[in-house]
Amino acid sequence: MSPASIIAIDGPAASGKSTLAQRLAQRLGYLLVDTGAMYRAVTLAVLRRGIPVEDEAAVSELAQRVQIDLRPPTVADGRSYDVLLDGEDVTWAIRTPEVDANVSQVSAYPGVREAMTVRQREIGKRGQVVMVGRDIGTVVLPEAELKIYLDASVEERARRRYEERRERGEEVTYEAVLQAMRERDRFDSTRQHAPLLAAEDAVVLDSTGLSVEEVVERAMALVVREERRAAHSHEGDD
């Protein structure tokens, strides 16, 4: 494995972590693993079966049974990977407002997170992956050689999400998006199981006011730094 064969990227909603992970994976030739897509796939399965999202036992049991996989993209439609739910391509089906509205609750259940964590670890330990989520550096892959916690002010993150939704033709106000973002932050950071927080050895990058390219270059500098650190370590072992 290369010195930074496993890269973990965590951060709150709309911090830009998925975009950063995608760009890093492309630059390095690594597999992009968006763990949020896996939780969205579970949520989609729950909604399709008519299981109430409040039924923790039923939701967790379903998460244990369904087969969810992330693979390199097979369709040139803008996707960064394929999301398979029991063999069905649900890459875009998991991006609906209904899934958006329920994924936080589904992903908060310990049974769901345990089921997904097992699969995420299996993928991560193959090496040459950029894995993005909310507890990668702290829970899923604490052994990752490079951990990045990407943050931004809640106002900046709400502005980004507002613009995304307006571009999709949704009728929404900035104030509503900001309120929802604050509630999402509160929910994610205070949940009992795997709360959102930066790993002790993570490098915190604040993307407020930075372009995507500037964030990517700062992250690439961290990759290079990790490679140099590992090289010096190996020289010391000689």
Image (tube, rainbow, N blue to C red):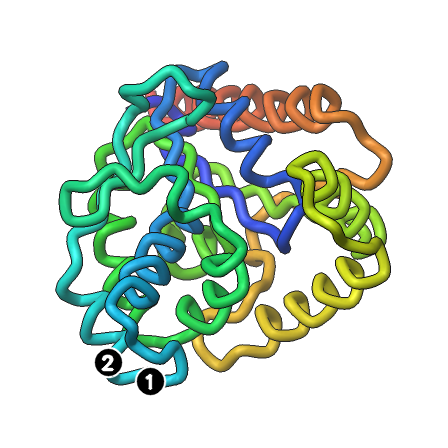
Q: Are marks 2 and 1 in contact (CB under 8 Å)?
A: yes
Give coordinates of residue 8: x percent, y percent. Answer: 46, 42
**Mark 2 crowd level (few <14, some 14–19, many ≥20, 10 Å Cα):** some
Give coordinates of residue 38: x percent, y percent. Answer: 34, 51
Q: Residue at x 70, y 28 (%)?
A: 215
What SS does tag 2 mark?
helix
Above or below: residue 133 compared with residue 192:
above
Looking at the picture, which amino acid does disc 1 mark? Asp
Looking at the picture, which amino acid does disc 2 mark? Ala
**Mark 1 crowd level (few <14, some 14–19, many ≥20, 10 Å Cα):** few
- Name the quadrant of the N terminus: top left
Q: Residue at x 58, y 32 (%)?
A: 19
What SS does tag 1 mark?
loop
Closer-to-camera residue (69/7) = 69
Q: Residue at x 24, y 41 (%)?
A: 84
Q: Residue 55: give its label.
A: 1
Name the residue carrying label 2: 58
Question: Is 200 placed left or right of 204 in the picture?
Answer: left
Give coordinates of residue 138: x percent, y percent. Answer: 46, 59
Question: Is 125 placed left or right of 56 in the picture?
Answer: left
